[in-house]
Amino acid sequence: MLDRRTEILMAATRVIARRGVRGLRVGELATEAAVSTALIYYHFTDRAGLLRETLAFISDRADRYTAERDPGAHPGGPRAELEQVLMLELQDTADVRENSTAWGELRATAVFEPGLREDLAKVTHTWVYEIADLLARARPDGTAPAHAAAAERLTALVEGLSTRWLSGSLPLDHARQLVRGAIDTELGGSGAVG
Amino acid sequence: MLDRRTEILMAATRVIARRGVRGLRVGELATEAAVSTALIYYHFTDRAGLLRETLAFISDRADRYTAERDPGAHPGGPRAELEQVLMLELQDTADVRENSTAWGELRATAVFEPGLREDLAKVTHTWVYEIADLLARARPDGTAPAHAAAAERLTALVEGLSTRWLSGSLPLDHARQLVRGAIDTELGGSGAVG
């Protein structure tokens, strides 16, 4: 059984994915999570604390999509593992759509709410580091700064494509194909158009 | 002298960049633009019409940052022109910060407001087409589908990096350096890390 704290965070993610961070009111969240507003304040102190913990929850949940994977032991090798990890935010399931929508919304909200920025930068850094590590395993001949830059580009590309997908500018299959092309371009022996 | 319609659109961009689309109320916009709410409704019919016209205005204004450029006659050739056009949203000036913030906010809002999606997809398509054309001039030996895919990746990357910059996850100079690296990788003879 889930604890109350987790139930509140799941409900907050649902509400953010449905109506946006700015549509999130603590009173409505209490109704959605079937708890009292007092319990929400008890666990998260204030709205800013709730948003920060929801960000951490969303980030952990994205990791869990591939919780079954055994790092370094992917049957397709590090290239396939890299593709799998990058595609986490680009899948047509209710869970992933909800998670990606909430993630994008928290990212967009941080432009206007400085209180979210530090945690968001940390979570982004962790993601970039994970991808740089996979790039290093896929191409051990590359340099660490080159792996880091490629990881920053690939993760920012996934964020950009995810928002295009969710805002109706790009079909999901095409977004996934563009990410595969980007992996090839970053790892590969020749440029995409040259 | 600017006409009233343009003054309203400039004021709408300022308000969106300051407080977000969801902080935009027609009454406050009227105060900001020093016009009556009736005039706003006269020009834009409703809030949805105002948002669509603001999107078009922001998109046109981004083009004007390099209005002085003579397409196809850039002194640095198509590679330099490509870099210049892609960097439009990544500059540390009040105008660009305002425009990029408002653009990112309209993109994020379209996830929740389907009425914005069609116009946003059109503006995105125009941007991708312009970049694909520059890629084709920079590397005439590439294929049209390869140029189109590279243009979609480069523009989505700029959107992703712009939002990271504005949300405090990435310094601007570093974002610009990553875009330069992406141009090299898309055009170049070798992958970034291989």
Image (cartoon, coloured by chain):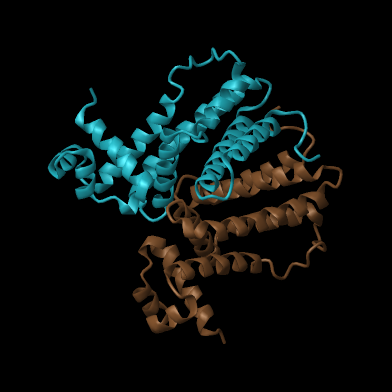
Chain colours: A cyan, B brown
Screen quadrant of the C terminus of chain A: top right
The residue at the point 37 percent across, 40 percent down is: A119
Q: Does residue B170 appear in this view?
A: yes
For this rendering, which residue is in front, B120 or A181?
B120
Q: Residue furthest bottom?
A: B1
Q: Is residue A135 left or right of residue A19?
A: right
When asked about the image quadrant of residue A61, the answer is top left
Q: Position of residue A177 (x, y in %)?
A: 64, 35
Q: Residue furthest right?
A: B141
Considering only vertical position in the picture, is A43 above or below B78? above
Screen quadrant of the N terminus of chain A: top left
The residue at the point 57 percent across, 21 percent down is: A81
Considering only vertical position in the picture, is A49 above or below A1? below
When asked about the image quadrant of residue A149, the answer is top right
The residue at the point 29 percent across, 50 percent down is: A24
Q: Does residue B20 appear in this view?
A: no
Q: Position of residue B150 (x, y in %)?
A: 70, 43
For this rendering, which residue is in front, A186 or B108?
B108
Q: Is residue A143 left or right of residue B73?
A: left
Q: Position of residue A150 (x, y in %)?
A: 62, 34
Q: Is residue B178 left or right of residue A3?
A: right
The residue at the point 32 percent across, 45 percent down is: A15
Q: Position of residue A105 (x, y in %)?
A: 41, 47
When asked about the image quadrant of residue B21, the answer is bottom left
Give the number of callouts.
0
